[in-house]
Image (spheres, rainbow, N blue to C red):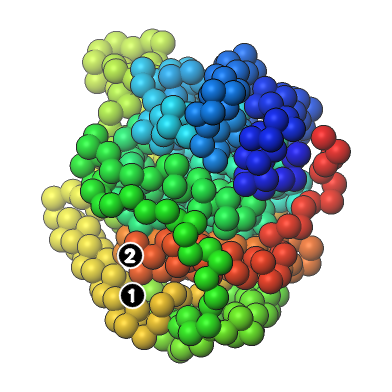
């Protein structure tokens, strides 16, 4: 059961081979046994999960279930939940219980009938690429426990890779679904900006943040995206578009698909072993009938600098709400209102979050705004235009997800530039608001390598199709870490 796809689990539940309560118990038992070592979950509440599972079983018995009803899923701790506390990986929210569910959570629970296994570990306020900025401690990569699972959705990735959950939610502001998916041999999809509601998803950089699915395969991601997406009037950037079935094109042959290879993604900034796996994947796509086209994204080298102005600027505004008055942590001793604010924020936020707030406040301040923030917004436009011209010549773009495989715990915590460059291939996608995926494409020194697929706006079904056909032909996504107890 722990190695089945969501489709297979749905079939097993429908055929009454297993009940949702039994399936949920199986995963909860694994979490209890293996999580102390992996640290993928921040909060687990067995009774609450089982209550949901009983409701799902009742729905299935009444013939009112959908394809995902009764299937367990782990939730990134950035999504507000009324049941479990919502910490966002921060001391600031360590005891925060939301009065409402995020739209994504409500859709998965009430809409699809999925069962939450708990809340997964993450970089504090989603700021990081290694899960090492979490107040709740680092997460270990099940492929090598000396290594990071990636970030910021590191707990979600690690949970799926260790089969503590068959799937999970993630969020991606600059790569946080795709890079951990790459490091843990998973499939992750960041949708077009506006496809998945941000209501109840704690804001980091609102113009870049997007929730999405993480799972073992493209087919699983398609089913999850169907359940997560849709217009939400409570998110002013949610797009009111007709509902689509993201699984509809999965089996379509790839003959004639034009794949763009941006020359900027194939330079010496990428680890040669990662590049070798990516090249083999490109050959595989050629065998599947795709045509390869050389393209250029001439401003992509500016994406990391532009992002580290725009994202902190938005974060500094978004995080101003954590002031000790309305939400979360409050410093125990203070002399005045100002003192309360200062002590609460000094004690409640970790170093990386403080650094981002400082940078953000600086680039927005009078006298610096034009030089930094406005300039970064101009670069953002150029990057979006680069993609627009590229998509005249190709249907999807392919390259590495990350320049390296999973790095060692502690390796980059003192070299922030190196840490920030972990997202050199993923960030431009967020700046342009495009959909992007990472899929497993082989191994380098025993560690998973991710292949990134980038689509034009609303081309999720096409990306999932390209990913699914590749997965059917190669099977890399079926590899599991060797030292994880997979016996139930
Ligand atoms: N690693 C990037 C950062 O630290 C992106 C994080 C994300 O996508 N949430 O900001």
Which quadrant of the view contains residue 394? bottom left
Image quadrant assignment for residue 447: bottom right
Left of 241 or right of it: where is 213?
A: right
**Residue 382 falls in which quadrant of the image?**
bottom left
Residue visible at 28% across and 28% down in the picture: 321
Q: Which mark is residue 387?
A: 1
Spatial CA span between label 2 and label 1: 10 Å
In the image, residue 196 sits, relative to residue 84, either above or below, namely below
Q: Secondary structure at mark 2?
A: loop
Relative to the observer, which residue lies in front, 152 or 15?
15
Residue drawn at the location 79% of the way across and 51% of the way down: 481
* x 64%, y 77%: residue: 281
* Image location of residue 282, percent across then percent down: 60, 81
Look at 78% across and 67% down and name the residue there. 445
Q: Can you say whether 314 is above or below 272 in the image?
A: above
- The reply to whether residue 121 is in sight is no
Check disc 2 and report the residue beneath it.
457
Toward the viewer: 70 or 145? 70
- Relative to 27, say whether 252 is above or below: below
Q: Residues within 10 Å of mark 2 (few under 14, many from 20)?
A: some
Q: Earlier in the sequence, mark 2 or mark 1?
A: 1
């Amino acid at each position: 059961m722990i190695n089945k796809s969501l489709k297979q689990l749905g079939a097993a539940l429908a055929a009454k081979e297993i009940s949702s309560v039994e399936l949920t118990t199986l995963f909860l038992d694994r979490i209890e046994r293996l999580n102390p070592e992996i640290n993928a979950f921040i909060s687990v509440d067995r009774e609450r999960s089982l209550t949901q599972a009983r409701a799902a079983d009742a729905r299935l018995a009444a013939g009112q279930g959908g394809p995902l009803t009764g299937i367990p899923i782990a939730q990134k701790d950035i999504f507000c939940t009324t049941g479990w506390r919502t910490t966002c990986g921060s001391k600031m929210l360590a005891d925060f219980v939301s009065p409402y569910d995020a739209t994504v959570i409500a859709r998965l629970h009430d809409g699809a009938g999925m069962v939450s296994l708990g809340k997964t570990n993450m970089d504090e306020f989603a700021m990081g690429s290694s899960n090492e900025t979490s107040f709740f401690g680092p997460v270990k990569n099940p492929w090598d426990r000396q290594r990071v699972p990636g970030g910021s959705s590191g707990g979600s990735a690690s949970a799926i890779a260790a089969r503590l959950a068959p799937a999970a939610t993630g969020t991606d502001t600059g790569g946080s679904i795709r890079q951990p998916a790459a490091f843990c041999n998973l499939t992750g999809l960041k949708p077009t900006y506006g496809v998945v509601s941000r209501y109840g998803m704690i804001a980091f950089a609102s113009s870049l943040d997007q929730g999405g699915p993480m799972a073992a395969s493209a087919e699983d991601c398609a089913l999850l995206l169907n359940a997560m997406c849709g217009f939400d009037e409570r998110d002013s950037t949610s797009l009111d578009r007709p509902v689509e079935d993201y699984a509809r094109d999965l089996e379509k042959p790839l003959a004639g698909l034009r794949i763009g290879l941006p020359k900027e993604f194939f330079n010496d900034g990428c680890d040669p072993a990662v590049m070798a796996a990516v090249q083999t994947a490109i050959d595989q796509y050629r065998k599947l009938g795709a045509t390869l086209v050389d393209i250029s994204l001439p401003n992509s080298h500016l994406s990391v600098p532009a992002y580290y102005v725009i994202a902190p600027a938005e974060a500094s505004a978004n995080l101003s709400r954590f002031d000790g008055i309305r939400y979360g942590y409050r410093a125990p001793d203070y002399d005045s209102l100002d003192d309360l604010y200062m002590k609460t924020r000094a004690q409640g936020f970790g170093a990386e979050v403080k650094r981002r707030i400082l940078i953000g406040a600086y680039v927005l301040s009078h006298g610096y705004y034009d030089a930094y923030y406005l300039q970064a917004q101009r670069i953002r436009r150029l990057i979006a235009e680069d993609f627009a011209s590229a998509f005249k010549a190709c249907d999807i773009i392919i390259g590495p997800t990350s320049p390296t495989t999973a790095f060692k715990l502690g390796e980059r915590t003192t070299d922030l530039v190196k840490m920030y460059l972990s997202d050199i291939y993923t960030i431009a996608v967020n700046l342009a608001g495009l959909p992007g995926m990472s899929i497993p494409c082989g191994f380098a020194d025993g560690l998973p390598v991710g292949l990134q697929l980038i689509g034009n706006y609303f081309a999720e079904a096409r990306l999932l199709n390209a990913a699914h056909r590749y997965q059917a032909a190669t099977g890399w996504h079926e590899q599991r870490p060797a030292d994880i107890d997979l016996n139930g």
